[in-house]
Image (cartoon, rainbow, N blue to C red):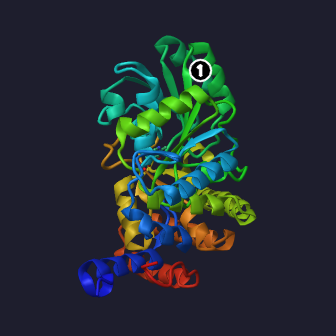
Amino acid sequence: SYAIETFDPEIFQAIENERERQTDHLEMIASENFTIPAVMEAMGSVFTNKYAEGYPHKRYYGGCEYADVVEQLAIDRACELFDCQFANVQPHSGSQANGAVYAALLKPYDKILGMDLSHGGHLTHGSKPSFSGKNYQSFTYGVELDGRINYDRVMDIAKIVQPKIIVCGASAYAREIDFKKFREIADEAGAILFADIAHIAGLVCAGEHPSPFPYADVVTTTTHKTLAGPRGGMIMTNDEDIAKKINSAIFPGLQGGPLVHVVAAKAVGFKHNLSDEWKTYAKQVKANASTLAEVLVARGYDVVSGGTDNHLVLVSFLDKEFSGKDADAALGAAGITVNKNTVPGETRSPFVTSGIRIGSPALTSRGMKEAEFEIIANKIADVLDNINDSALHAKIKEEMKELASNFVIYEKSIY
Ligand code: PLP
């Protein structure tokens, strides 16, 4: 038989092991989440077999009638979710989505102004190792030492740089982003405003973070972070001319056939995001992150900007002997998965760093609330207070496994 368990036991075992890892550890990487089984069922469906180059009802292949149904549903639900006119649901990832925005709206070597990677921006916001820093002239703004964007300072930079496009949105920024202020800055500099809401999209669609619409000209997101859908990207706009350019930039510009099984899974994810249950979830994500920040502050840790408005907390160890890398490893040994992260005023290399980023979306999807986050935050502080005590880390790992066992996520690996 071609059932994976018997046909390919090595891969099957790795999948089983991964399910166990996801179950036993506390997943606190801010960009990760647990998707619902219905999303995984769509991803594992027969649509993986289908070529559907083009867009609904304008395809280059026959037999696309059901691919049209799923892509149109994904588009309609995305537009309803974010209250916008146009959506392209085909980008294979957030980076592809961002690449398509630049390809659609810029010429090579045009100027981009985005948030510095080491201050919380993403690689695709103009970082030198990324296509965005190679194919375009990139300039950056950052956060102040208090961990917040100073919009007057961004205005000054934008006036000097005169970029063609300003990118707002971040991968490690714990405070609300003021899209209206960014609009004013873009207008002053004569720039297009591009909002990348990959991290906060699940909060935005629930009304738990201000929307980039109507301020941004174009908006991208990933679908797998706070949105808890399948891995992938999406581009949205209210401008018909931009929408046309974006569609051509994705196909045939950057991609071939869409991943129709993933597009189907995006549609299922959006249905989840449109539910009342989702609003409750998004509120809880924020409440849990706040609890985490409050406990860490009470335990004497330097939480960047003093707290959080969203789903993540950035902790600085600039005042400590140990690094972000050390903290990441110690917490890993204690069954708590986070990631090392640069912090404002960073003194160490990006591979070592002086901070960690901790997120609440995944554990909130497991059903954890403030009470559990209070326990976990105290355990995180215990680990950090005793960074070299591997016996303590092992003990906490067992405790965290016990806590996690009360919040089952997946009964089986293959849907
Ligand atoms: N944009 C932001 C703000 C992100 O944080 C990320 C991923 O971390 C991306 C884009 C890129 O997404 P992907 O990893 O799907 O390419």
* Residue 277 locus on image (x, y percent): 72, 66
Displayed quadrant of residue 283: bottom right
Identify the residue at image location x=49%, y=60%.
230
> Could you say which is closer to the camera, residue 413 or residue 127?
413
- In the depicted structure, whether residue 396 falls above or below residue 160: below
Q: Which residue is mark 1?
A: 186
Taking the view exactly as shown, the residue that stands out farthest to the right is 276
> Could you say which is closer to the camera, residue 410 or residue 364?
410
* Residue 72 locus on image (x, y percent): 58, 51
Badge 1 amino acid: Ala
- In the depicted structure, whether residue 58 falls above or below residue 113: below
Identify the residue at image location x=66%, y=57%.
286
> Could you say which is closer to the camera, residue 19 or residue 41?
41
- In the depicted structure, whether residue 383 falls above or below residue 174: below
The N terminus lies in quadrant: bottom left
> Could you say which is closer to the camera, residue 68 or residue 212?
68
Taking the view exactly as shown, the residue that stands out farthest to the front is 62
SS type, badge 1: helix
